[in-house]
Amino acid sequence: MNRDNRGATWRLAVAWVMLVACEAGNSPQCPSALAAAESVYRECIAEIGLAAESLTIDVSGDIEVQFDDSYTPEKGELAQKTCEPPMQEALALGLLACETTEIGVLASAERLREQALRAGEDGFSGSVAIVRDGVLVWHGGVGLADRARGLANDSRTAFDCGSIMKVMTAAAIYQLAAEGVLAREDTLGALLEGVPADKAAITLAQVLTHRAGFHEYHDTQGDFEVMDRSTALQRIFAQALQFSPGSAEAYSNSGYTLLAAVVEEAAGVSFAEYLQTRLFAPAMMTRTGLYGDDLWPEGQVAVGYDEDRFGCNSPACWPEPSWALMGNGGLVSTVDDLVKWSAAVEAGALFDAQTRDAFRRDILGTRALSVGGEAAYSYSGRNDFGFGAAVAEVPGRRTWVAVTANAAGNHNNSALMAQLVQMSLGALIELGP
């Protein structure tokens, strides 16, 4: 059963953390990487019902923590086993991200290519595209897309992009709102039929920001469970809310499935058709679609490796997404298309500047990041079948970096993305307050 594709909460938080860097050689205390590690640890212990009154983490990864009255020996042991490893990973990757950055020096295409190849020596297998100041600096592949046939990855190779689908789903809602078809403060009860009373007043804004109270999943068999829209909505609406809408936050794939249904109702077309005609086509993303689409030439869709398997373990043969996955996963794309997406959002090809800024603030801006004084954004996706993808955007420099992987368990592609962003701009990425 695949659970990573749609992203455990802390794993998505780490996608932001990976863009945090420090100049390890000159700053032994490394405050931004330490802050990143602390953020991951606090979020993890909160999930097991703990809170820390004081917390100190040093650059070696040693931790001193004083819990509040929520502490029990059992919870303390669980925190050590489940929360210290991701904290250590966040710290290590934060340090790793700045190892190769020369402050004030914009890395050349060859230098960026060498860094990608070096990552390949450490287990990375995938593709990279880097746009700096609106110009493609380098794109290419590392490792094999299909080991059995000896086919190499390149920038045209398509990969499962996991939860990056949620960025597209959110963009569809913001686009429809900009056109006056709906509003982000509209309620589910006003937009969908059969919404029970306890969920009728939930707004789209609450669903978009994971503050509606919906559960993480509505399937029982994983991403490939056969499920139609009616069944999906019935299951989601039948689940008791985890909290009063707007009062807390809990990551929900099911919420984004509801948003896909809202798009269909508002636009009068299937969700897949909306994606192709209203988002991908204007962004000139000709090699982006969903599982089951006939878009990619033979041999140009990667196979996932070194984790779980489903069928041929490639989107090339996976069935089209059912409503277990619709709106929250099932996206297939290339690095060339992913940087086109970033450029299209910036250029106003999808919605006006005011909507674009709100979209970035609400959907992409959950952590305050900057590089060289410019705001930076990051998002990622992952699954259990070897696939991962990560995108970084620095709009003030018209700089976009996309990394995809088909052996994602062997190397953290978000860390590679952070390295390439910093090298491209010759500046460290910093975590804001």
Image: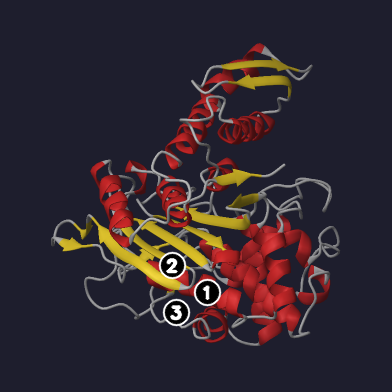
Mark positioned earlier in the residue sequence (2 or 1): 2
- In depth, the one of 288 and 413 nearer the eye is 413
Q: What is the basis of the colouring in this image?
A: secondary structure
Q: CA distance from mark 3 to mark 1?
A: 11 Å
Residue 327 in view of the camera: no
Mark 1: secondary structure: helix
Q: Is residue 410 left or right of residue 172?
A: left
Above/below status of 103 relative to 294: above
Mark 3: secondary structure: loop
Q: Residue at x 83, y 52 (%)?
A: 246
Rendered image: mark on residue 131:
2
Q: Is residue 179 left or right of residue 81?
A: right
Q: CA distance from mark 2 to mark 1?
A: 9 Å
* Contact between labelled residues 1 and 2, with CB atoms less than 8 Å apart: yes
In the picture of the structure, the residue carrying the numbered disc 1 is 343
In the picture of the structure, the residue carrying the numbered disc 3 is 285
Q: CA distance from mark 3 to mark 2?
A: 16 Å
